[in-house]
Every structure is written in C-alpha cells, then in structure tokens.
Image (tube, grey):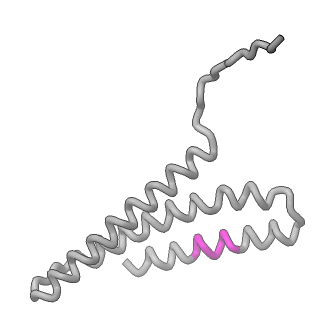
Amino acid sequence: MAKKTKKTTTNRTTSVWDIVKFCAYVAMVIAAVAAMLAFVFGLLAKVDINIGWAGRVTGICSMIAQVALIVAVIIPAYHFMRTKSAVVRAFFWVAVIFLVLGLVGINLAF
C-alpha cells in the first residue's frame, strides 16, 4: 500500500539569497543602463554635441552597478569563508577592505 504524502506550504520570508539575487539583478540592469548611456553620449560626441554632465551620469550609474555587484559577490563569499581557516578569513576581509577603498577612490574621481 502506498504511503500518503502530506504537502505543506510555508510563508516565505526574505532571505540572504533573495538579497543576493536582487543585488545581482540591479547590478546587471544598471550596468546595462550605464553602457547604453555611454554609447549614446559617445554617438552624440561624434556629431559634435557635447553634454557636460554626460560623463558624470555614466560614472554614477557605473558606481551604483559596482556597489550592487560587490554586495552580490560578498554575501556568498562570506558564507563560504565562515567555515574556512583563519588565513582564508583574513584574506577575505582584506579583499573587502580593498574593494571598499576602491569604491571610495572611484567615487572621489567624480
């Protein structure tokens, strides 16, 4: 005789992986917008239409995309390195610090 299986459903809450997926999606969309803006502004520059704030807008879009992408990468990397040795954990935190300092440096350029 076959056993009856019971199907239960639970309320879904936002998890860490939902945040990672969201940040990856946002990074992809904003990077596409930044690339499209750079393309359009490049075409406008070829026909001698100069927009003074074009580079700043493209740079800001690129920076937001990089922040979202870094968040999407750091969270899974953090979960991976939690069970590793102290050397791996130290290397992770040094890499995170360099990423943040790189973003601050990119932000200062604008």
> Main structural element of the magenta stretch: helix, strand or loop?
helix
Dividing the picture into quadrants, the one containing residue 35 is bottom left
Which residue is the extreme one toward the left?
48
Q: Residue at x 60, y 24 (%)?
A: 11
Dividing the picture into quadrants, the one containing residue 49 is bottom left
Tell me: 65 left or right of 94.
left
Q: Position of residue 61 (x, y in %)?
A: 36, 67
Dividing the picture into quadrants, the one containing residue 77 is bottom right
Q: Residue at x 46, y 78 (%)?
A: 106
Q: Position of residue 80 (x, y in %)?
A: 76, 58
Q: Residue at x 86, y 72 (%)?
A: 87
Q: Position of residue 55 (x, y in %)?
A: 28, 78
Q: Quadrant of the C terminus?
A: bottom left
Tell me: 107 left or right of 61.
right
Q: Residue at x 38, y 62 (%)?
A: 30
Total numbered badges shown on the rendered structure: 0
- In the image, residue 71 sits, relative to residue 108, either above or below, namely above
- In the image, residue 54 sits, relative to residue 26, either above or below, namely below
Which residue is the extreme one toward the front?
1
- In the image, residue 107 sits, relative to residue 79, either above or below, namely below
Question: Which residues lie in the magenta part?
Answer: 95-101
Q: Position of residue 45 (x, y in %)?
A: 16, 85
Which residue is the extreme one toward the right?
85
Q: Is residue 106 magenta?
A: no
Q: Quadrant of the N terminus?
A: top right
